[in-house]
C-alpha cells in the first residue's frame, strides 16, 4: 500500500501562496507588501524555469510515469496551471487595486501614458530618444503563414519584457500582409522612468514608453499594433559530468544551451491585441496551456527595487541590525576566542562577522599554514573570495572545492574559480555525479610547535550578503575531533580517498541517510517500550519518501514529531493510524527561514545537529552534505532554544492540515502573541546591552586578581 504523499510541485505552490499572503496583510506598510509580491513573482520565475521546465521535458518525451502522489507529468502541468492562474491574478489585483493606490496616497504613483500632461509626455519622448532608442535592437520575425514561424523563438530572450510590433507599408489593414518585429527591452535599462517636477515619486514604466514611441524605429512604415509579453524558457538543463574531460568547458556549453530552452510560459499583457497574441503563440511554438494573460505590469519581481526608495520612511519596515555575539567583538583575535570555547551563531540576528573573521584573519595570520573550504554560492563582490586570494598571495596552502553545478550561479562560480586559480589556489570542481552542497571550512594554524585546526560548519552559504537576509546557523570550534573529521572530508573530496563513518560528522550520500534513519528508529524503539520519545526537525523541504515513511512509522509507535518546514512538505500530518502524532508548521516572515536543525530526545539526553541538507532525495542521495553533531553543552542548549522558538510562533506561523492546506496561527484568547523572528532579534540585542552594561559609563572596569578589591592610586609628582 503506497504511503500518503503530497505532490511536490503543488506543495511548493502552497509555500509561494504563503509568501503572497504576507502582501495581503493590512498591518504591513505598502512597500513591504509590494516586496512580498515581488518575492512571490521571482519565486514563480524560477519555478517555471526549473520545475515546470523539467515536467515539460517529460511531457515532450511522452513519459507517463507517476510521481509518489500518483500524478503523471501531464496531470501535474494541468494542476500547476490552474493554481498559478489564480496566483498571478491575485498578484495583479494586489498591486493594481490595493498596494499602488495606497502608495499613490503617499506620492508614489505609476502613470500611464494617457495620464501624462503635454510637458510630461514631451519629457518621456526625450528620454526615449536620448536614453532608450540607442539601446533598442529590433529583430525581424518570420512572416505568418511562411512555415518558419517556430524558428522565431531563437531570437526571443527569456525573462525579458519584449514589445512585438505589427508593421505595414500601407495604412490599409487589408492591403498587404503585415510583418512582425520584436523589440526586446534590455534589462540594463531602468524599469521606472521618474517624471520630474511632480510631487513624490511619479513614474512611467519603461515598457510603456517603448510601446508608445516604438514607431520611431520604423520611420517609413505604419505600426498597426503592438503588444507586450514576457517568455520564460526551460532552464532545467543539467550537466552529466560522468567522464567529463573538461568540466569547466562542459558547463559553458550547458549555460549556452540554457539561453535557448523551449518556451514553458508566455505572459501576455491583457492590452495586447488578440491577433498579436495568436502570432506570438505560433512564432514561439507555445501551447495554449503556456499562455498566462496578465492584468497588470509584467515582471513584478522588478518592483522589489521600489522597496528601498529613499525618502519614504514608514512605507517600508526598518531593517534589524545584526548583533555581535558576546564571545567576540570586531578586531578581537578569533583564534583566541575559539580557544576559549565553541561558538554557535544564529544569523542574521547574530552577526556573520565572526565567520568572516575566521577566513580574513587566517589570510593574514603568519601562523596559519593552510585553509580548506567548500564554496557553493558567494556574494557578487565576495569578501570570502578576496580573503582566499590574499591567503594564497601570502603563501598559504589554500584549497577550495567550488561547485560549478550550483544552479544559476554556474557562470559566477566559473569566473571565481578562474580568479582563485590565477593566484595559486588549488581548485577542485566538486566531485563526479554529485553536487558539493556542504558548508565547511578548516583553518590549520601552527601553535606551540604543533598544528591546530579551527573549523566552521554552517547551514548557509559563504555569502555575507544573504547572511543578512536568511536565517542560518554557524558552528565554530577548535575541537581536535572536528578538525580531524573535517580534514578527512576534504581529503575525500579532493584526493578521492575513501570516506569512512565518523563520530561527529555524517556525510551524504554515504552516511547521512543511515544516521538519520538510525536516530528516528531509536526514538521509535523508546516509544514502543512506553518511554518518552520526541523528534523535532526544522528544514526547508521534506520530500524524501524514505524519510517520510520512517517518520510515519515513528508516529504510529507514539513518537511525538514536530516539523517546521518552510517550503515543500510532501508528508501528510494528522492522519489516523499513520501520522496522528505528527505536526507540521511553516514560518514566513521578514527573513527567509533557511536553517536546518535536527533534535532527538534520546531518553532525556537530547542529540542536536545542524545540517546543510534538507530531507529531500537529491540532498541525501545526490549531494555531498553534512549532518554535524553539536558537542558543546552550552551550544546544544542554545540550538534547542532556537528550535523551540520556532514551534512557539503563533503570529507568523502556519499549521499544515491533513489535506495539505495551511492555516495561519493566531494567539488564543487571552494569550500573548509570539513572533519567533522578533524574539530572536530582541534576545540578541538584550545580550549585547547586557554586555555593554559591564562597562561603566565614562571608564573601564578592570578584572582584578582574586582577593584584590581595588588598585591604590598613585598621584603624579
Image (cartoon, rainbow, N blue to C red):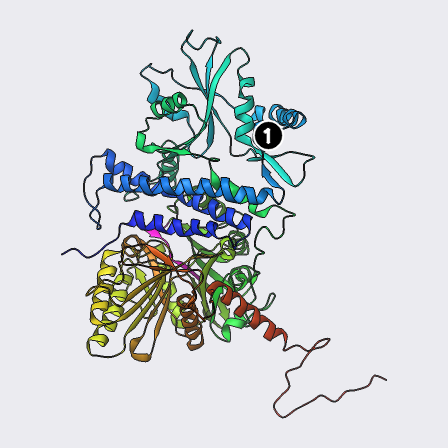
**Residue closest to the eye, 17 or 153:** 17
Residue receiving disc 1 = 115
Q: Quadrant of the C terminus?
A: bottom right
Residue at disc 1, secondary structure: helix
Furthest residue in direction bottom, as rendered: 707
Specify the segment rendered in magenta. 430-441
Residue 114: x and y in percent read 57, 27
From where the camera sits, is residue 555 visible?
Answer: yes
From where the camera sits, is residue 48 visible?
Answer: no
Residue 172: x and y in percent read 46, 8
Q: Is residue 692 above or below residue 615?
A: below
Q: Is residue 487 left or right of residue 415?
A: left
**Residue closest to the eye, 184 or 695:** 184
* Residue under the image location 47 percent in, 35 percent down: 296
**Residue closest to the eye, 352 or 169:** 169
Other residues around mark 1 within 10 Å, as few (<14) / some (14–19) / many (≥20): few
Q: Is residue 75 left or right of residue 48?
A: left
Amino acid at each position: 500500500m503506497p504511503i500518503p504523499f503530497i505532490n511536490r510541485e503543488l506543495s511548493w505552490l502552497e509555500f509561494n501562496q504563503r509568501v503572497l499572503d504576507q502582501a495581503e496583510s493590512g498591518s504591513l506598510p505598502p512597500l513591504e507588501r509590494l516586496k512580498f509580491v515581488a518575492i512571490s513573482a521571482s519565486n514563480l520565475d524560477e519555478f517555471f524555469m526549473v520545475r515546470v521546465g523539467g515536467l515539460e521535458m517529460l511531457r515532450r518525451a511522452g513519459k507517463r510515469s507517476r510521481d509518489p502522489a500518483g500524478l503523471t507529468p501531464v496531470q501535474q502541468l494541468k494542476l500547476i496551471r490552474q493554481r498559478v492562474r489564480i496566483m498571478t491574478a491575485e498578484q495583479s489585483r494586489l498591486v493594481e487595486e490595493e498596494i499602488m493606490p495606497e502608495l499613490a496616497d503617499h506620492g508614489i504613483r505609476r502613470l500611464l501614458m494617457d495620464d501624462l500632461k503635454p510637458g510630461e509626455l514631451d519629457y518621456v519622448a526625450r528620454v526615449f530618444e536620448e536614453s532608450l532608442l540607442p539601446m533598442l535592437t529590433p529583430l525581424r520575425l518570420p512572416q505568418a503563414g511562411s512555415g518558419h514561424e517556430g524558428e522565431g523563438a531563437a531570437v526571443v530572450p527569456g525573462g525579458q519584457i519584449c514589445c512585438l510590433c505589427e508593421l505595414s507599408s500601407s495604412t490599409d489593414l487589408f492591403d498587404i500582409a503585415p510583418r512582425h518585429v520584436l523589440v526586446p527591452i534590455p534589462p540594463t535599462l531602468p524599469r521606472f522612468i521618474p517624471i520630474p517636477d511632480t510631487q513624490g515619486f511619479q513614474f512611467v514604466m519603461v515598457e510603456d514608453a517603448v510601446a508608445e514611441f516604438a514607431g520611431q524605429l520604423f520611420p517609413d512604415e505604419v505600426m498597426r499594433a503592438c503588444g507586450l509579453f514576457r517568455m520564460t524558457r526551460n532552464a532545467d538543463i543539467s550537466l552529466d559530468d560522468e567522464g567529463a574531460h573538461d568540466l569547466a568547458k562542459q558547463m559553458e556549453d550547458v549555460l549556452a544551451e540554457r539561453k535557448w530552452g523551449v518556451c514553458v510560459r508566455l505572459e501576455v499583457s491583457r492590452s495586447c491585441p488578440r491577433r498579436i497574441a495568436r502570432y506570438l503563440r505560433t512564432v514561439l511554438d507555445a501551447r495554449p496551456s503556456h499562455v498566462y494573460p496578465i492584468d497588470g505590469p509584467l515582471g513584478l519581481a522588478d518592483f522589489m527595487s521600489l522597496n528601498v526608495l529613499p525618502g519614504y520612511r514608514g512605507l517600508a519596515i526598518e531593517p534589524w541590525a545584526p548583533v555581535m555575539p558576546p564571545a567576540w567583538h570586531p578586531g578581537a583575535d578569533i583564534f583566541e576566542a575559539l580557544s576559549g570555547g565553541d561558538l554557535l551563531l544564529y544569523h542574521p540576528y547574530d552577526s556573520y562577522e565572526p565567520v568572516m573573521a575566521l577566513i580574513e584573519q587566517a589570510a593574514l595570520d603568519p601562523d596559519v599554514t593552510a585553509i580548506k573550504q567548500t564554496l557553493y554560492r558567494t556574494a557578487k563582490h565576495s569578501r570570502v573570495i578576496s580573503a582566499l586570494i590574499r591567503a594564497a598571495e601570502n603563501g598559504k596552502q589554500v584549497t577550495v572545492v567550488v561547485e560549478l553545478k550550483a544552479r544559476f550561479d554556474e557562470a559566477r562560480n566559473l569566473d571565481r574559480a578562474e580568479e582563485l586559480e590565477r593566484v595559486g589556489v588549488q581548485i577542485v570542481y566538486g566531485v563526479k555525479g554529485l553536487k558539493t552542497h556542504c558548508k565547511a571550512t578548516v583553518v590549520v594554524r601552527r601553535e606551540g610547535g604543533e598544528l591546530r585546526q579551527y573549523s566552521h560548519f554552517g547551514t548557509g552559504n559563504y555569502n555575507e550578503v544573504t547572511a543578512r537576509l536568511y536565517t542560518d546557523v554557524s558552528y565554530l570550534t577548535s575541537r581536535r575531533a572536528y578538525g580531524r573529521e573535517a580534514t578527512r572530508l576534504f581529503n575525500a573530496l579532493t584526493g578521492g580517498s575513501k570516506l569512512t563513518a565518523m563520530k561527529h560528522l555524517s556525510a551524504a550520500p554515504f552516511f547521512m541517510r543511515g544516521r538519520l534513519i538510525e536516530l528516528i528508529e531509536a526514538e521509535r524503539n523508546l516509544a514502543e517500550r512506553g518511554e518518552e520519545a520526541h523528534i523535532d526537525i526544522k528544514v526547508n523541504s521534506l520530500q524524501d519518501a524514505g524519510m517520510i515513511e520512517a517518520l510515519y512509522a515513528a508516529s504510529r509507535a507514539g513518537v511525538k514529531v514536530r516539523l517546521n518546514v518552510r517550503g515543500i512538505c510532501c508528508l501528510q500530518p494528522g492522519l489516523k493510524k499513520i501520522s496522528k502524532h505528527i505536526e507540521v508548521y511553516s514560518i514566513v516572515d521578514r527573513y527567509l527561514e533557511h536553517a536546518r536543525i535536527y533534535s532527538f530526545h534520546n531518553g532525556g539526553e537530547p542529540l542536536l545537529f545542524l545540517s546543510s541538507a534538507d530531507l529531500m532525495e537529491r540532498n541525501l542521495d545526490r549531494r555531498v552534505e553534512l549532518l554535524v553533531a553539536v558537542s558543546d553543552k552550552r551550544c546544544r542548549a542554545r540550538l534547542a532554544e532556537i528550535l523551540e522558538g520556532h514551534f512557539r510562533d503563533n503570529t507568523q506561523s502556519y499549521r499544515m492540515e491533513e489535506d495539505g492546506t495551511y492555516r495561519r496561527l493566531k494567539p488564543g484568547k487571552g494569550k500573548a502573541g509570539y513572533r519567533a523572528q522578533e524574539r530572536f532579534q530582541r534576545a540578541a540585542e538584550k545580550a549585547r546591552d547586557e554586555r555593554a552594561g559591564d562597562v561603566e559609563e565614562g571608564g573601564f572596569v578592570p578584572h582584578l586578581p582574586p582577593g584584590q578589591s581595588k588598585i591604590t592610586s598613585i598621584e603624579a609628582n
